[in-house]
Image (spheres, rainbow, N blue to C red):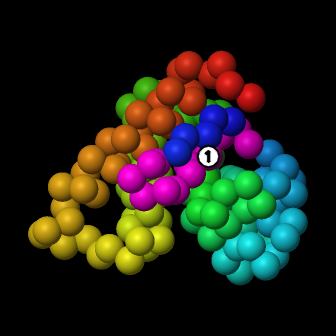
Amino acid sequence: MKKFHIDVYDVWLHVAVNYPKNKFFKTYFADKACTEPLETEIDHFEAKGFSWGILSTKQHPRVLFININLEKAEGILDLIDTITHESFHSAVGVAKFIDTPLNDSTEEPYAYLVGFISKCVYKTIFEPKDE
């Protein structure tokens, strides 16, 4: 997993590849008071990827988590599609954190944010040097 700080919005992005479901729950949902409600049996881990907005953890006040399941990707174009898809969800998560809806005047910041998040996911997959 790699962690990226989105300075301008003071949000942390945690990007993982093939992250285990039990570790996800243990890491992010051990303290139920620090996050949005989450049903115990989510099916997100069966998908090609998923993102989750977490209100806070013990280390960071606002976290976005993205997991990419490389075993489910059906080639590089499918992987690019999944990265873009999850990056958009995460950009929406940032916007919710800062109460900024998508409209004509916020379209450009959204686009930059999707691009930045996509790069972070790409780096995690293709330059895996961190924890």
Which portion, as a residue range, is magenta?
A: 6-19
Residue 45: quarter of image: bottom right
Does dot 1 land on a helix, a strand or a loop? Answer: strand
- The residue type indicated by label 1 comes to His
Q: Which residue is disc 1 drawn over? A: 14
Q: Position of residue 101 (x, y in %)?
A: 30, 75
Q: Position of residue 53 (x, y in %)?
A: 58, 65
Is-magenta flag for residue 15? yes
Left or right, residue 18 beside residue 52: right
Name the residue: 48% across, 36% down: 120
Left or right, residue 77 beside residue 35: left
Name the residue: 42% across, 44% down: 117
Name the residue: 56% across, 19% down: 127
Q: Quadrant of the C terminus?
A: top right
Residue 38: quarter of image: bottom right
Q: Quadrant of the N terminus?
A: top right
Q: How many marks?
A: 1
Instruction: Say above or below: 127 vs 24.
Output: above
Q: Position of residue 68 (x, y in %)?
A: 59, 42
Name the residue: 54% across, 35% down: 73
